[in-house]
Image (tube, rainbow, N blue to C red):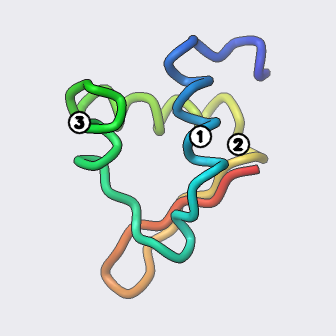
């Protein structure tokens, strides 16, 4: 399904993979700043990734924070 990723989704996925959002909590605000876009686009991108790459990304909530793991 990776061929179905938009250019933005592919960049977002690569960024998530190289970051450590298992140890450091995820921040949509920080992601939006890094990608120079609105947080809404980040939310849409992450949601799309979970549909298109369900076996390669995991989002979970722990200790009051969202964490993301991707490979």
Give the x, y percent position of residue 28.
Answer: 30, 48
Give yes or no for contact between labels 1 and 3 (Cβ–Cβ under 8 Å): no
On screen, residue 31 versus residue 39, left or right, reads right
Nearest to the eye among marks 3 and 2: give it.
Answer: 3
Q: CA distance from mark 3 to mark 2?
A: 22 Å
Q: How many marks?
A: 3
Label 1 packing within 10 angstroms: few (<14), some (14-19), many (20+):
some
Residue 18, disc: none
- For marks 1 and 3, the one nearer the N-term is 3
- Mark carried by residue 54: 2
Cα–Cα span, label 1 and label 3: 17 Å
Q: Quadrant of residue 51?
A: top right
Which residue sits at x=54%, y=59%?
68
Q: Position of residue 46 (x, y in %)?
A: 47, 38
The residue lying at 57 percent from left, 12 percent from top is: 6
Q: Secondary structure at mark 1?
A: helix
| Mark earlier in primary sequence (3, 2) | 3
Q: Determine which residue is flagged by label 3.
A: 39
Q: Residue lying at the far bottom in this picture: please name it.
A: 63
Q: Are marks 1 and 2 in contact (CB under 8 Å)?
A: yes
**Which residue, given by chain and number where applicable, does mark 1 sit on?**
50
């Amino acid at each position: 399904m990776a061929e179905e990723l938009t250019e933005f989704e592919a960049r977002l996925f690569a960024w998530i993979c190289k970051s450590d959002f298992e140890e450091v909590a995820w921040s949509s605000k920080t992601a939006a700043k890094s990608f120079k876009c609105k947080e809404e686009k980040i939310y849409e991108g992450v949601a799309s990734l979970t549909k298109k790459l369900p076996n390669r990304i995991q989002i979970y909530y722990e200790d009051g924070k969202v964490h993301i793991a991707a490979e």
